[in-house]
Image: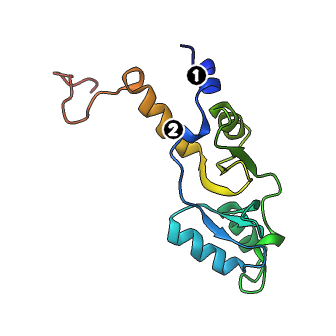
Amino acid sequence: MNFRKFLQEERVRSLPLKEPAVVDSHTLVRAAIAAMRTKSLGCAVILGPQQQPLGVFTEHAVVGLLEKSVPLDSTAVSACADPEFHVVKLDDPIAKVWSAVQSGARFVCVVDDQQQLVGLTGQRGLAEFVCECFAREIAVQRLSSPQMKTREGA
């Protein structure tokens, strides 16, 4: 099966999903950073009242705020959220996540049919999935058992 066809046939629900760090639009930046650190993630998803994603606050935004000396204790995440965040449904083809990552997204929100957040995926989720599905094709030699018998070079 060709890779593009595989991405069209497999569904987002097959990807490994991470439990996201979630905040509301009034959460202060410092609290959002703490939530991101707790989950060991590079973003926090801003949720609306019905648990639908309204935006994503990323570590990239944190760097921008620090460069501008913006006070982290008095700035809400909604003021500096990524305006172009990506959302896919569980039953969408994985090709949608692939497309989002190719366009520069590191994180993609995954929602159910009611548009409620169920998880987070993106670059790492795709990489893990591809490595698992195509293990034989991308297998590499173990470092503990090198096949080289003689040294190369000087």
As displayed, is residue 108 above or below residue 143? below
Front in this rendered view, residue 110 or 86:
110
Residue bearing the label numbered 2? 127
Colour treatment of the image: rainbow
Residue 6 numbered tag: 1
The mark that comes first in sequence, 1 or 2, is 1
At 69% from the left and 66% from the top, the residue drawn is: 63
Q: Amino acid at mark 1?
A: Phe
Binning the other alpha carbons within 10 Å of mark 1 as few (below 14), some (14 to 19) or many (20 upward) gives few
Q: CA distance from mark 1 to mark 2?
A: 14 Å
Hey, which quadrant is residue 43 in on the image?
bottom right
Q: Residue furthest bottom?
A: 73
Q: Secondary structure at mark 1?
A: helix
Tally of marks: 2
For the point 65% across and 25% down, the residue is 8
- Residue occupying the point 74% across, 48% down: 86
Furthest residue to the left?
Answer: 149
Mark 1 or mark 2: which is in front? 1
Q: Is residue 123 left or right of residue 128?
A: right
